[in-house]
Amino acid sequence: MGSVFAGATAIGMLDLALLLFGRQLTGSFGVAGAVTGAFGVGNAVGLPLQARLIDRFGLVRVLAPAGLLCGGLLLGAAVGLTSRAPAALVVVAALAGLCLPAATAGTRVLLRDLVAEPAVRPAGYALLAVLFQLGLLNGPLLVAGLVAVTGPRAAVVAAGVLACASGVLPALSPAARGSGGNRKATHAARPTSYPGVRTLVMGAAGTGLAAGLTGVGVPAVALARGVPALSGVLLSLASVGMLLGGLAWGARPRRATSRHLLRGQVGVAAAALGVAVSTAWLPAFGVGLFLGGACAAPVSVTASGLLDTVAGRPVLARAYALMVCVQLLGSSVGYVLGGNLAPVSPALAFGCAAAALAGTAAWTRTRRGSLAAAGGGLSRPSG
């Protein structure tokens, strides 16, 4: 779990740290944006690639080298690059993203192996989600403190140390060292050959789309009020809701079911609709964001738990990584779409988020059969 927290903190730091470092090094926000974008693309490519390797070779043999490479690349960029090499900074950022340890995906699979009782696993998945969210929240705060004291170069170095730690820490765990993987995993069925995995992946796309629209809509509301700093407070309400929702959901042992997933998705869609109609009244707007976050946490935990039912063990890490990757891509599309809608009307952006979430719930409703194990066992791949 320490690996997950360190990795999430590094992720929370690096977007802002690389942006500020690139701006300081080159004097160009265009180059700085390219650096941050390159890191994101590298991470999106590296996540499923590392998951495939974890399925085959085990946790430690993949994460430890990845962490050392990622930390070394970031340290080298902070110490060795100059303003004369903006292209090199973009390349190094992409490689660092590629090597950023897939600690959450690996730990997710390890939890499945360590916790034999299915009804207890959601508590572990909830803790995983809470630690990841805490790390994401801590990251920008650490960057702000380091930049204020020493500058963005130190923030990049610190993020590199944390990324390295997230890859190396599993080597200290006997359970992680005992996770040897399956050399035949690469010859197993693809994750998307399981109907239930396809259901969850498409649901993750809709959730990501709504998250991106919300990420643009909230600052747009704050800017319309003439208080840009309020956006951080409002977004933190959703984050606090996710933390509390995850803790509450994980406190009671329960088996993940499609019914739980569907109810959570309907709850998030309703909260998003409430947000869309309350942009003119900030108290109700904030309450809607908090409730949306509180409903989103059980959706994330339940979807993760359902992977144990719908995906075979040899493809579990790849299935989880694919779900996260598609959610990130959906979020990117949401940010682009929200950037065009929010200036016209923030309520329109939130309305589209509510529609995306309602569509996700409808998709889950029509595909409930794919999320049920056949004959008490795992669902089977098709096609």
Image (cartoon, helix red, strand yellow):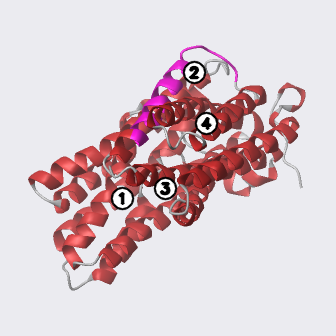
For disc 1, the marked residue is 15
Q: Is residue 222 visible?
A: yes
> What's the distance in space between the residues labelled 2 and 4, CA to CA?
22 Å
The mark that comes first in sequence, 3 or 1, is: 1
Say if the magenta span includes residue 152: no
Element marked by disc 3: helix
For disc 2, the marked residue is 249
Q: Residue furthest top?
A: 252
The N terminus lies in quadrant:
top left
Q: Is residue 4 visible?
A: no
Within the image, what quadrant is residue 138 found in?
top left
Asked whether the residues under the numbered discs 4 and 1 touch, taking CB atoms below 8 Å apart as contact, a structural biologist would say no
For disc 4, the marked residue is 274
Residue 37 at x, y = what percent?
43, 68
Residue type marked 4: Gly
The answer to whether 213 is drawn above or below residue 251 in the figure is: below
Element marked by disc 4: helix
For disc 3, the marked residue is 216
The mark that comes first in sequence, 4 or 3, is: 3
Asked whether the residues under the numbered discs 2 and 4 touch, taking CB atoms below 8 Å apart as contact, a structural biologist would say no
Asked whether the residues under the numbered discs 2 and 1 touch, taking CB atoms below 8 Å apart as contact, a structural biologist would say no
Magenta region: which residues?
234-255
The nearer-to-camera label among 4 and 1 is: 4
The nearer-to-camera label among 3 and 1 is: 3
The answer to whether 303 is drawn above or below residue 195 in the figure is: above
Image point (30%, 64%), residue name: 18
The mark that comes first in sequence, 4 or 1, is: 1
The mark that comes first in sequence, 2 or 4, is: 2
Q: Is residue 131 left or right of residue 350?
A: left
Residue type marked 1: Asp
Image point (26%, 44%), residue name: 141
